[in-house]
Amino acid sequence: MIILLILLFTALALALFSGDWRSGLLITVVIGFAQDPIRKLTPGQPGLYVGFVLVAFVASAFVLWQRHHGRFDLPLIFPATPVLRQWFPAFVLLIAIQAINALLQWGIPLRTLIGVGFYLSPLVGLWVGFQLGRFQPFLRQLLQLYLFTTALFGFTALLDYLGAQSPLFDSVGRGLLIHFRRGFFSEGAIGLWRSTDIAAIHLTIGACLAMVFALSGSAGLQRTGWLSLSGVLAFTTLLTGRRKAIVQVLVFVVLFIWLLSRYGTGRSRKQLFGLAISTIGLALMVLVFDPRDFLGDDLGEYFGRAASAPDDLWNRFNLLGLNAFWRGLAISNGMGLGVGTLAQTGDAAVQSVRGEGFAFVSESGLGKVTAELGIPGILVLVILGFGLVQAVRQNLAMIRYLPPAIGAFEIGLLAFALSNLPFFSAAAGVYGDPFVLILCGICFGSFFAVPMLLSQHTQRISPQLSSSPRHSASFPLRGAPESSR
């Protein structure tokens, strides 16, 4: 398996040295999946293997940045929100200061580096996502590769659930025993993934993205295929025993449908009717072909655990939301403990930083960020949050002027990115994985390419409109209301 890793990085190096950042990103996706089974078969199962995908991604992003002559293009990403152009560099500076703070306090460089990656990888992902959003065919190709590999890994999770034995299906470390009820417990299915939470989040991402493809230009059997894949991946999340996964899928569906009905075109709204019909058809198939016939009677235990998710998650949000925020504020001493202080590194052979309340706060994304960045960090993030809300609203106002397939695609990626926010606040562990952060950043960043996509669309149709005196159109580039059309 080490040979496979060497071959992947050799292919990555050859691609990037030739300036082919597109192939670099495709190989990065493969590395993101391959690093888990390779780690399982490596003596000692070194935890730092999870950083391979970040190394590959940053290298590919660097080549892309060079192709843009070293420009970050912040005026293009946020054309109508100068506050973001001013405060994003301030946030990066804050991370650098808190990295120095962590080194001086704890003296653990590797842990500090992990913390820097946690904060900066989604920002790099956002920038790369914006660049990819301008080139929709390649963005779709990249995400389709991700979906294909997720489906393959999801099949191995199904085999794991059915009792297939292989060292590749073992958990990294000691694993996690999930108690369903008194007298029944299981480790949950993971397949080639390293743990149940990582399996669940990737299956969730796959289910969401497959639905985005189903509602963004696909028709007929192709749409049914994407919807079927989405349903299968969502169902497979149940086999991991992680309840919040299926809840996140439902949150995404509600967000996607609401945003599409409110900001999509008339054609996009009509597609929602087709979605309802297809969903009902797939549900009837599930009722006819009872999955317990080939997955066993224990499947009912997994359904029962999923049904208990709402009450459990509400309690978790209450405990690890505001409570963790206040506790994080208390242990931060106001100025912050430094990035990486509360990083959950598992068996990464990285020295732990111990303190009263650290373990509790590290489980919460909100509490962790508060403790590590302190009051200055929270203030900067609040400013950035308001700016991002303003930018998103402006782009949503423009999106109906795009071709329906592109508009629905971008709305879907936005809905997926937003669906992660409540779960990050109450379950930060899985978001410590660079691959997950990169994917979220790319999906969110792509949405900020809407003004550029609208400009491209306007330039393509302008010659047609000018040659036809009977037609005229105007395309607002800063969110004019629909009445101005």
Image (cartoon, rainbow, N blue to C red):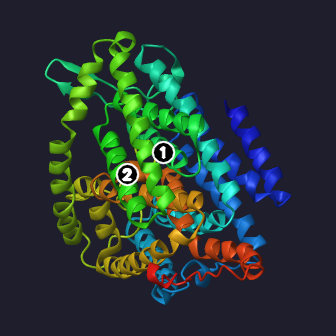
Does residue 76 appear left or right of residue 239 in this picture? right
- The residue shown at (28%, 38%) is 243
Q: State the CA–CA distance, disc 2 to disc 1.
A: 10 Å
Q: Amino acid at mark 1?
A: Met
- The residue shown at (41%, 74%) is 101
Q: Residue furthest right?
A: 18
Badge 1 crowding class, 10 Å Cα cut-off, few under 14, some 14 to 19, many 20 or more, is many
Helix, strand or loop under label 2: helix
Badge 2 or badge 1: first in the primary sequence: 1
Name the residue beneath numbered marker 1: 211
On screen, residue 463 above or below 197: below
Q: Quadrant of residue 289?
A: top left
Q: Position of residue 359 (x, y in %)?
A: 26, 53
Q: Quadrant of residue 233?
A: top left
Q: Amino acid at mark 2?
A: Phe
Helix, strand or loop under label 1: helix
Q: Position of residue 435 (x, y in %)?
A: 53, 50
325 vs 245, nearest the viewer: 245
Badge 2 crowding class, 10 Å Cα cut-off, few under 14, some 14 to 19, many 20 or more, is many
294 vs 332, nearest the viewer: 294
Name the residue beneath numbered marker 2: 252
Does residue 268 appear left or right of residue 419 in this picture? right
On screen, residue 381 above or below 413: below
Q: Residue furthest front?
A: 470
Residue 340 visible in the shown view: yes
370 vs 321, nearest the viewer: 321
Residue 481 visible in the shown view: no
Circles 2 and 1 in contact, beta carbons < 8 Å: yes
Q: Position of residue 27 (x, y in %)?
A: 70, 46
